[in-house]
Amino acid sequence: MSRWEIRIALALTLFLGGFPQASQAATPTVSDALATIAVKGRAPKTGYSRAQFGPAWEDVDGNGCDTRNDILKRDLSAKIYKDSCTILSGILLDPYSGESIDFLRGVGTSSLVQIDHVVALSNAWQTGAFKLTSQKRLAMANDPLNLLAVKGRLNSQKSDGDAATWLPPRKSYRCAYVARQVAVKAKYGLWVTPPEKAAIEKIIATCPKQLIPTS
């Protein structure tokens, strides 16, 4: 499969992400997708702010619920709702640690479960997002492909790290984690740094058949 064919397959996979049967045959491995991504050093952080990616947790899909609530609805189990959007409580099986965490909405408790941008927005800015339109950055900040409900302390620990500087402590999840990072960077035309690529390749060597996720 040529590099050009991989790019076409990758674009179709991400575009048809909501249609698994249509995209299954074209879904590239992480290694194939990584081969299509440019490798450069980090650009300066100059000009970065959270506001460059639009207001936090917009209702970009128009379903009446903001993105944070959409991701909690997707990732929590045993949910109890206040209304059709707002979850009062639930249980998170944290992908980063493997721990079961009780989510309880409230001033002192909501932060125990946070929504992580798998490709941190600051990292995205420094690897090409500064070139994107404001609408593309808004889409990336609210894209379920780039979002996971996780243990709050680990989200804070990760900060804006990439695969070279931070990985989930749960080693069995690392292949899926870097696969999601590669999928996001490929979808939005971002690049990886040399240390980041080396770290991803080291992980994927343990799971060479890992496919990129589509949602």
Image (cartoon, rainbow, N blue to C red):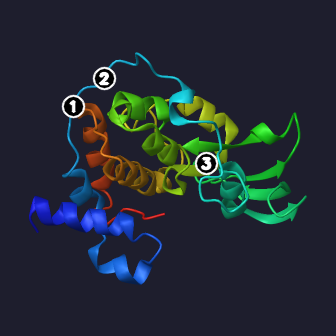
Say which of marks 1 and 3 sits in front.
1
What amino acid is at disc 2?
A: Ala
What residue did someone put label 3 on? 97
Q: Which sits earlier in the primary sequence, circle 3 or circle 2?
A: 2
Compared with 109, 17 (above or below) is: below
- Marking on residue 208: none
Note whether residue 211 is visible: no
- Marking on residue 43: 2
Residue 208 is situated, as x and y percent measured from the top left of the image, at 27, 62
Question: Extreme left residue here?
Answer: 2
Q: CA distance from mark 1 to mark 2?
A: 9 Å
Note whether residue 17 is visible: yes
Residue 212 is situated, as x and y percent measured from the top left of the image, at 36, 62
Identify the residue shown where x is 26% and y is 48%.
201
Compared with 176, 50 (above or below) is: above
Identify the residue shown where x is 42% and y is 63%.
213
What amino acid is at disc 1?
A: Lys
Q: Which sits earlier in the primary sequence, circle 1 or circle 3?
A: 1
What amino acid is at disc 3?
A: Ser
Query: Neighbour class for label 1 at 10 Å: few (<14), some, many (≥20)?
Result: some
What residue did someone put label 1 on? 40
